[in-house]
Amino acid sequence: MKDENIKTNDSLVIGRNAVLELLKSGREVENVLIAKGEREGSINRIAALCKEKKIVIKNVDRRKLDSLCAGGNHQGVAANVPAHEYSSVEDILAFAEEKGEAPFIIICDEIEDSHNLGAIIRTAEACGAHGIIIPKRRNVGLNFIVSKTSCGALEYMRVARVTNLASTIDELKKKNIWVYAADMDGQRWDKTDYSGGAALVVGSEGNGVGRLIKEKCDVTVSLPMLGKVNSLNASVAAGIIMYEIARQRLN
């Protein structure tokens, strides 16, 4: 018989009792995966706890859950836990102050690809960013793929996960941090002054920066598209602009 507390991929807890105990422990949980049609017994308690703790539930096909759990006895439920502990926005700002530097923050708006987030974290660390902010919903969390893709950078990068990205941006602006959206139809990225506190918003792979978030930003910056495609990979675009911010800070 398989151990009901088995973890796979270093970030997945499977089995009803294991997930229940995880939820009751107060440990950070990315989301809970429940096989479609499962709503009996302790699954109801798990769903209720998720609602109480505002944890996202994803209804998935049982075959997908079987695959994710690598043959483990998941009993129709699994929970994704972070591969790394989250920080807070306050932690990020305190780190910048401790270093005697104006805050340099990356904000991810609905980045759903783990490899992209991992690559962004890796470049952000190399560029001297103080932290990254991601939303709790509709954004990939700190799973094992993110950790692996960051090539160790996650161990040195503070990542805060917030409930409301728009209000977080408002709070940053109150602290004299200018917010720049990396999106289409903006001013040239290399002709923009990023001096002082700066937060760069990177949008999703398919839709870019959301309308509400873009409206909150002070400036929109764009990269020229000289070929036939009209967009860049999120992590590539972020990396180019991050290094321009870093370059200006070195001068």
Image (spheres, rainbow, N blue to C red):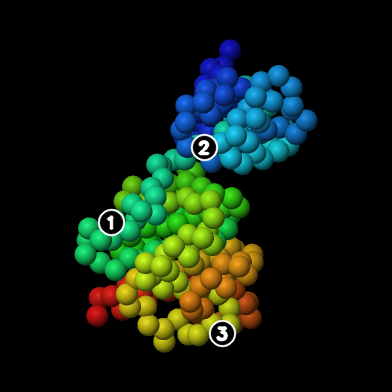
User: Secondary structure under badge 1?
Assistant: helix
**Location of residue 211 by image quarter:** bottom right
Residue 72 placement (x, y as % from top left):
60, 24
Please state which of residues 194 and 149 is positioned toward the viewer in this rendering.
Answer: 194
Specify which label sits upstream in the sequence, 1 or 3.
Answer: 1
* Residue 110: numbered disc: none
Residue 94 placement (x, y as % from top left):
29, 56
User: Hey, what amino acid is under mark 3?
Assistant: Leu
How far is the residue under mark 1 from the one under mark 2? Answer: 25 Å
The answer to whether 49 appears left or right of 123 in the picture is right
Q: Is residue 71 visible?
A: no
Residue tagged by mark 1?
A: 95
User: Hey, what amino acid is under mark 1?
Assistant: Phe
The answer to whether 130 appears left or right of 67 in the picture is left
User: Secondary structure under badge 3?
Assistant: loop
Rate crowding at label 3 as few (under 14), some (14 to 19) or many (20 or more) other CA atoms within 10 Å.
few
* Residue 226: numbered disc: 3
Query: What residue is rendered at 47% in x and 26% in y?
Result: 25
Say if 156 sits above or below 67 in the image. Answer: below
Residue 137 placement (x, y as % from top left):
59, 50
User: Secondary structure under badge 2?
Assistant: loop
Specify which label sits upstream in the sequence, 2 or 3.
Answer: 2
Please state which of residues 127 and 215 is positioned toward the viewer in this rendering.
Answer: 215
**Location of residue 41 by image quarter:** top right
Residue tagged by mark 2?
A: 29
Rate crowding at label 1 as few (under 14), some (14 to 19) or many (20 or more) other CA atoms within 10 Å.
some
The answer to whether 32 appears left or right of 102 in the picture is right
Query: What residue is rendered at 38% in x and 70% in y?
Result: 177
Quadrant where the N terminus is found in the figure: top right
Residue 110 placement (x, y as % from top left):
57, 58
Rate crowding at label 2 as few (under 14), some (14 to 19) or many (20 or more) other CA atoms within 10 Å.
many
Q: Is residue 59 visible?
A: yes
